[in-house]
Image (cartoon, helix red, strand yellow):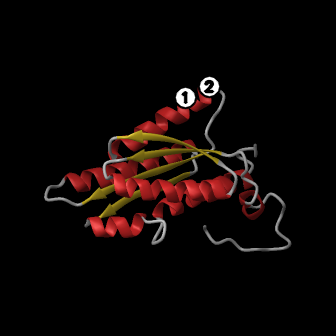
Amino acid sequence: MVSQRRDADAPKDSPNSILESLAGTRVLVVEARYYDDIADELLAGARAAIEAVGAEARVFTVPGALEIPAAIAILMDAGRKAGGPYDAAVALGCVIRGETGHYDIVAGESARALMDLSVAEHLPLGNGILTVETMEQALARARVSDMNKGGGAAEAALSLLAIKRAANLEPAR
């Protein structure tokens, strides 16, 4: 989790106190399952981090990393229209460099689109799309018992949500 200063004099609506009261928060998780073993680990880490604060994960799957930003935008909009909006989102996937320039396009464009979406919509979003050179690097970063980047992405989204709530931009549920 993002380290936060523990301050006894902190206001009760500070990110510290809000982060500790995220029960009922709805987190959208969109995963690309191009590499199933990696996707399993990323999702396990993200779920554990989300459930650790009493939040609920709703998981959707897309074929690859390029589809993740569009899926998040579509699902966030659908949630708002249905009256059950998501509070935060997490993107999970993996892009491994190959012999062509496709890696650069997928890695760069998915990251750019996620950042654009997060900033434009004030969406607390954790980017857990791994961009690596080898399968070994991907597995080390994805494994819950190792670098746990799925958990880190979920924690980033939850920390941003806590900041958003502390700024009174979104009420707690």
Residue furthest top as drawn: 82
Q: For residue 42, what is the image quadrant?
A: bottom left
Q: Along the horizontal axis of the image, is 66 left or right of 120?
A: left
Instruction: Give the class, few, some or many, for how many residues have Cα within 10 Å of label 1's Cα (few <14, many ≥20).
Output: some
Q: Nearer the viewer, residue 119 or 6?
A: 6
Give the camera-side residue of 32 and 18.
Answer: 32
Q: Amino acid at mark 1?
A: Ala
Q: CA distance from mark 1 to mark 2?
A: 6 Å
Question: Along the line of sight, which residue is nearer the eye, 136 or 108?
Answer: 136
Report if residue 104 is visible in the image.
yes
Q: Is label 1 in contact with label 2 (beta carbons under 8 Å)?
A: yes
Dividing the image into 4 quarters, which one contains the C terminus?
A: top right
Q: Which residue is mark 2?
A: 82
Name the residue located 31 percent from the left edge and 48 percent from the top edge. 34
Badge 1 element: helix
The residue shown at (68%, 57%) is 53
* Element class at badge 2: loop
As displayed, is residue 107 above or below residue 137? above
Q: Is residue 153 visible?
A: no
- For the point 36% across and 49% down, the residue is 110
Query: Badge 2, how many Cα within 10 Å: few under 14, some, many 20+?
Result: few
- Residue labelled with disc 1: 78
Q: Is residue 152 above or below residue 71?
A: below
- Residue 131: give x, y in percent of width and height: 33, 61
In front: 32, or 106?
Answer: 32
